[in-house]
Image (spheres, coloured by chain):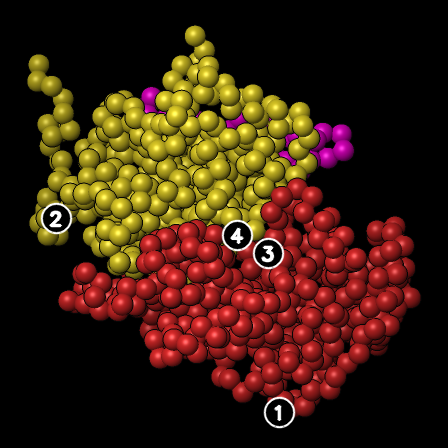
Amino acid sequence: MSTGSVEVVYRGIFQKTLAKNICRGIVFAAIKEGKIGIAFGRYSDSPERNGIPAKQFAVVSDTEEELQEYLSRYEPDNNDVTMVADDTLCKGVESWAWYGLQPINKLLAKDGTLLVTSTQSANKLIKTIHRKGSPYDLATIKAQASFSGLWVYKDDHTDVRLLGALAKVAPHIVSLDSVLEAIKDQWKDDKKVASAKKAHDETESTSVGAEQGSDAEPFSFDMPGYTKMEEGLVIRGIAAKGDIPGRDGGFVPGRNPTFKKYSTRTMRPVINFSTCTKCTLCWLNCPDTCFDITPDGFYEANMEACCGCGVCEAVCPVKECVTMVNEEAFEDNDSQWELWTKDKDGYSAWLAEKIANPPARSHGFHHIGQYAEEIANESS
Amino acid sequence: MPETTVESLGSFLETQVLDPWKGPKKVIPEEYYTSGHRTCQGCESAQLMRLMAKAGGPRSIILGATGCMYVANTTYYSTPWVVPWMHTQLGSTGSAATGTAAALTAMMRKGKMTKEPINVIAVCGDGGGVDMGLSAISAALQHLHYNLLILCYDNESYANTDIQVSGSSPYGANTTFTPPGKVHRIMHKRWKKNTAAMLAAGHPDVKYVGTVCTSYPVDAMNMVRKALSIGGPTFIHSLDPCPKGWDYDPKYSHELGELAVETGMWPLYEIERGKLKMLGRSQRIVNGQFKRKPVREYLMRQGRFAHFIDEDYDYVQKKTDEMWEKWLIPGVIPFFE
């Protein structure tokens, strides 16, 4: 007699179909074993937005009564497995229903398994994950995060590979045999079955100690009740002092102190201030108002506000002045402009290293036929 | 008989004088729509809100109908608004705008508020404006003695509720209501509603109606400034590429807006005091100085058209050619001679 639950944390819209395939797959596999299950998206993540972290769950029980009992809680909060469909989510998630940054292992049970899609080593990943305070296991499937969109799905087998790996790390929820059977039923594709089996065989877990991981304090704020909430404005405008007109003191827009959005970012812009012509286009076209105007007239992306859409790179007229780099290459949200002002040579070296061989990352649909080309390249 | 002018109606109020910004370097650094919203990466509607708030300045009241710019912008303690903002129901953009403008006029007349021009801007998506709120917008555009701007951010679907088809969705687009299937490849066969021109033609007293695209940010801001300065009810329709519903890498938001204009699928124009002027690339298309790009270049970049085959591209091309070659006023008013 038992209930098991799996939480799938993913990038909204980009991985919506992927997460749905996984959660449905878990329930179909459980049914093969005579169990009962349910797959559902977290209500408060809906409607999803591109890149904003979201969650779906699969809960599996031996009997219907146990399932009902488990579902009476607000949401599964003591999960046997937390699946992370994109490794940049390991830095924490700021999703719709959570005010502040939630550590990725927050809802994982003691001795549960964090299962991550990543090309990084386990040791490197552990450094980015917040300390849990109780031991757990970390398992990875070696893959780039699979991104597509609402209409065209990139079928690179990430869904079935995660299902196969799940059967390895949590056989008490679903066994390999039932997973393979469910995949065969659903997709009628022997290649997908083989991918799941291979991922199962290759998956290994690393133990993570209670005190291992990043000791950074996750961003949080106190939620005021209605008696303490302010009337009207939440964001203070910045009073026009002498430093705004003419821009000769720099200009930092007033920002929302309670919602930062940076956990949405999978890539971040790095800026070459030496080649910047101060043309204003990155600043003018940023939908997230993330650029601060520095005292010397440069535009610098504020890493607490940037969500990594890449529009600044697209509109920049200077070659390699703004370059989007995989978020996994960074450990903090520090100001690039400050680093550049302090040590120009050091900054140039840092910049060259970051943009030389950034880990590859897909970011959605570009043209018809692109996913087939990418899958062909990845498998060759 | 004395001529009926807005001034003769009695409650006319001065507008703010907002001069155009000549180039991106003249744009003010102050932000009235800042970071802290939960829109998608690369959301051009958020970009439009930001530009509109910048253009309107600090003495503005923003009213927002239900839609992405309500839900993603204003849940508990996640908001980017620095200026006052109020929610209104899906179909009541026009009513909220008229009511707010009327209230301001009355309060100032009664001396309960300092007399000063305050911008009233009501924003709605294509669901709220092009579909549900059309009648209320029409009513607002007939209240010539109130100063208000209705700004429609058109992402060509009900994007907030996960992409249902709207009157503004383009031919053939995949939405949750029009999924392509094995029997019927094209489920959405209506041509996009010609909203701005319809409102301009139907409300000849309105002093300013225009279409914008956020890929041309300075032009878009200057049109908002012109609409707010000119007085009376005004309407601006903006095409906003939507990475979620159109299905593309958010990085290309800017490029897709340009492609929509360059292929001729989104004409840019303004109708100021009854005088039509084509703008930017659209003007060059009409003058023959710019050859329209094939619509295929625009359509094949979006997952919502991934089911298209040659005949669908050809059909959209043919209809777009008609807009520019056969319409009574190219890109603006249909009717064939």
Q: Tell me what hue chain B is rendered in.
A: yellow
- Mark 2 or 4: the one toward you: 4
Q: Nearer the viewer, mark 2 or mark 3?
A: 3
Amino acid under label 2?
Glu
Mark 4, residue position: B250
- Residue B317, relative to residue A139: is it above or below? above
Label 2 lies in what chain? B
Q: Are marks 2 and 4 in contact (CB under 8 Å)?
A: no
Which chain letter goes with mark 3? A
User: Pointers 4 and 3 in contact (CB under 8 A)?
Assistant: yes
Closer to the observer: label 1 or label 4? Answer: 4
Do the residues at pointers 4 and 3 share their chain? no
User: Marks 1 and 4, how far apart in space?
Assistant: 38 Å
Magenta stretch, residue numbers: B178-201
Where, by quadrant of the figure, is residue A74 drawn?
A: bottom right
Seen at 41% across and 44% down, the residue is: B215
Residue named by callout 2: B116
* Of A85 and A340, the residue lying toward us: A340
Q: Which residue is mark 1?
A: A211
- On residue A172, which mark appears? none
- State which tag comes first along the sequence, 3 or 1: 1
Residue A363's tag is 3
Placement of A112 over or under B98, stated as above or below: below
Label 2 to label 1: alpha-carbon separation: 61 Å
